[in-house]
Amino acid sequence: MRLTQLLFSKIGKYSKDFSNLPDRYIKRAMEQVEWKNPKGIQYKANAVIKRTKYKFGMHRPWTAEFREENSPGVYHAKVFVEPIKKWSFFRGDRVEVLVGKDKGKQGIVKQIVQERNWVTVEGLNCVLEKMGERKDFAGVHMQMEKPLLVTNQVALVDPSDLQATSVEWRFTEDGSEVRVSTRTGRIIPIPATAEETVDYKTKATYKEQPKDTKANDVTQITFEPGLKTFEMDIMDVMNIKEDRIPAKYYWY
């Protein structure tokens, strides 16, 4: 299978679902302008060169750590990622580790980094990392889960017999797309925790906040386009009449 280099700007859908952040905010947070023309009539307007390729890791694109890792001048070795046509791993899935010291153990998927084909498994494939070391403080050791490749380092567990299996996507009679174990032919349902975000456990139990747009307001038409400027629109709303006569001007 053809490999693609891991330097791209598109973020995986399942990588950002848990954050529940708007796409426009993520795009603005990770944006890096390499060159912008100065202001002036002698310069071409809106000539901007933006960075289009990034190195993705465990730090999410809207964090300061990601910006530091991708700051100008930082060298990154080439990394190649195997393209996956249909993503099959979700938060809350039970998987079995196929490599390393925890080989054969099963755990729950905790985080997804789709850009690198990574998942972290809760409590497995851990290392101790020293954090907070300073001159007057020795620091503390924390246990951190390291990522595992979904292509060859973890496998989904069939809930019917709790054994590792490969999966494929199929359609049911009613047209729903489901994951099916290639070994037993049984459906592996997507866990309910897959829709969990930092804001709610499930969409149905989310309580509207004072600054949220109400569901009823979404269906209402609050803007009707017209052949007038913004200033003219405001004047119509406030019943302001323009009675001044503009001075004549000429083009030469």
Image (cartoon, rainbow, N blue to C red):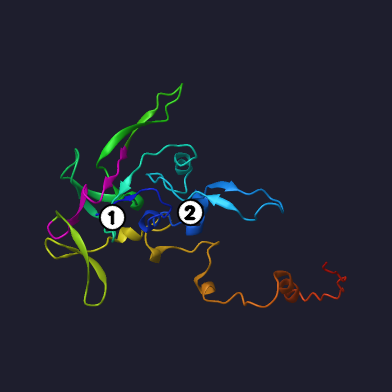
Disc 1 packing (10 Å; few <14; some 14–19; many ≥20): many
From the top left corner, tell me how far across and down residue 109 is, in percent: 28, 51
Q: Quadrant of the N terminus?
A: bottom left
Magenta extent: 144-161
Left or right: residue 46 compared with residue 171: right
Three-letter amino acid code at the position of disc 1: Gly
Q: Is residue 180 magenta?
A: no
For label 2, the SS is: helix
- Indicate the secondary structure of the residue bearing disc 1: loop
In percent of width and height, residue 101 lies at: 19, 38
* Quarter of image, res 203: bottom left
Q: Position of residue 223 (x, y in %)?
A: 61, 75
Most distant residue in the top direction: 136
Nearer to me, 199 or 131: 131
Q: CA distance from mark 2 to mark 1?
A: 24 Å
Say which residue appears at 62% left-offset and 55% top-offset. 46
Q: Does residue 145 sit above or below 29 in this rendering?
A: above
Residue ID at (77%, 76%): 239
Query: Is residue 76 left or right of 30 when viewed as pictured?
Result: left
Tell whether position 145 is magenta: yes
Q: Which residue is mark 2?
A: 26
Q: Residues within 10 Å of mark 2 (few under 14, many from 20)?
A: some
